[in-house]
Amino acid sequence: MLKRQFTTSASLLKNVRPAVKVSEKKGPQSVGKNLPFKKSEKAWDKAGESKDEYFRKRFAHIHAKQKSNDTVQRRERFQEQRDDKRREARDHLKTERHNHKNKFYKDVYQSLKPNPLSEYVYGRSPVLAVLQQRKRSFLNKLFVERAPSKDSEIVQIAKNLGVDIVVAKSKHELNLLSNNGVHNGYVLETKPLLPTQVFELGQVQGKSYAIEEDDFGSKSIQTHETSNKNPFGLYLDGITDPHNVGAIIRSAYFLGVDFIVMSDKNSAPLSPVACKTSVGATEFIPIYSVTKPLQFFDKSRSNGWTFVSAATAEHKTDEKIFSTLQSKTVPFNAIHSLLEEGPCILVLGSEGEGIRTTLKLRSDFLVAIESAPGVDLLIDSLNVSVAGALIINKMLNN
């Protein structure tokens, strides 16, 4: 059996040569020497000088201190450049803020800040009434929309009272002080109007009547006169809307009511809104407050005062109370005779809750205004200020 054999001729191997010359050195070899390379020429080579000679000619005459000064100057120069950039940035921001403020130059907060301890009465008639009556303890500044004329009554009275006159920079300043109310170009900084606290209504002798007032903790009897046949006052119970309070005060003063008594805890204060709605009547009519309404009713009734509540006898939960209130009800056309017989107090309550049951039970009479025939049940009552004005007029003028 024949075997196949393969051999390589040694003569052929001798004729084989590598394409690249291989180094006989051991270890990793670099191929960088096989790549094209351009060596950069040094400055002294370009000048045809040695390195030592090159630097000696150019820098040997510069003192070490001078070199240090050059470094310091260079550092200072760069610092000045940085400072200039920072200054430019600050100036730019300042300019931007100034331009932004100019867009809102009418912003009143830049020049005018309301005093939280003061009250600002607004409107021509209310301001004039406050200045004329001087019931408030403090009058500070009068703000006007434009430079006042010499014949301005308000400005002349304010000057005579020593009130500072301030011309507002814009109408918006007065809008701020008046809480966007209709100020008519006048806003007066003053103190709130505080009602005098009373305990009871005293005896009546002819057209004179007494009121027991709280004189800084002690009781003081003050006597007043009425122009009506008998003294006639209002009692406001739980009316929290200042617009309604102001409207009632206006009607009461206009129609001839002698005074007004308010519950101290659940009634709207005599705010600038109430003063504006009353057109300044808050400054003309005497206004009192009570802290204990039930005692006020009982003691005043014992002194001969008749209390008439503007309310219906309706009571949904207690039939006995309803029966009691029903027995107190009088027709609307008969209420004039009540004031003919003696001093009266008309009690008005809020539109929502009405007069409290405890006060209605302590009242001598109840009166209600009936609607015309055919009126939809959706319109079941009048505004309290309107109803009050109708009853007041009916009691004073038959």
Image (tube, helix red, strand yellow):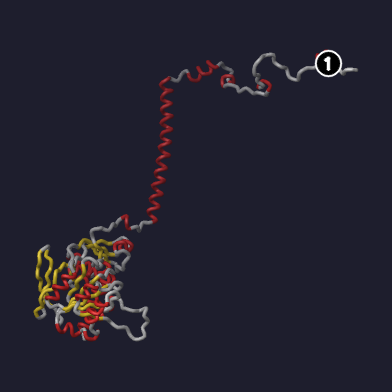
Residue 123 in sight: no
Q: Position of residue 180 (x, y in %)?
A: 32, 65
Residue at the image point whose x is 41% and y is 40% from the top: 86
* Residue 61 as seen in the image, left or right of residue 151: right
Image x and y of residue 182, in percent: 31, 68
Residue 24 vertical placement versus 184 (above, below): above
**Residue at x-position 40% and y-position 44%:** 91
The residue positioned 21% from the left and 77% from the top of the image is 346
Q: Residues within 10 Å of mark 1 (few under 14, many from 20)?
A: few
Residue 177, image x and y in percent? 29, 62
- How many marks are shown on the rendered structure? 1
Image side of residue 137 versus residue 385, left or right: left
Task: Using the image, determine if residue 362 lies above or below residue 23.
Answer: below
Q: Is residue 161 visible?
A: yes
Nearest the viewer among 22 and 311 is: 311
Helix, strand or loop at label 1? It is: loop
Q: In this view, which residue lies farthest toward the right?
A: 1
x and y percentages locating residue 133 in the rendered image: 18, 70
Location of residue 388 (image quadrant): bottom left
Which one is in front, 386 or 41?
386
Residue 110 position (above or below residue 2): below
Q: Quadrant of the C terminus?
A: bottom left
Q: Indicate the quadrant containing the N terminus: top left, top right, bottom left or bottom right.
A: top right
> Quarter-wise, where is residue 152 in the image?
bottom left
Q: Quadrant of residue 230?
A: bottom left
**Which residue is labeled 1 in the image?**
8
Give the amino acid at mark 1: Thr
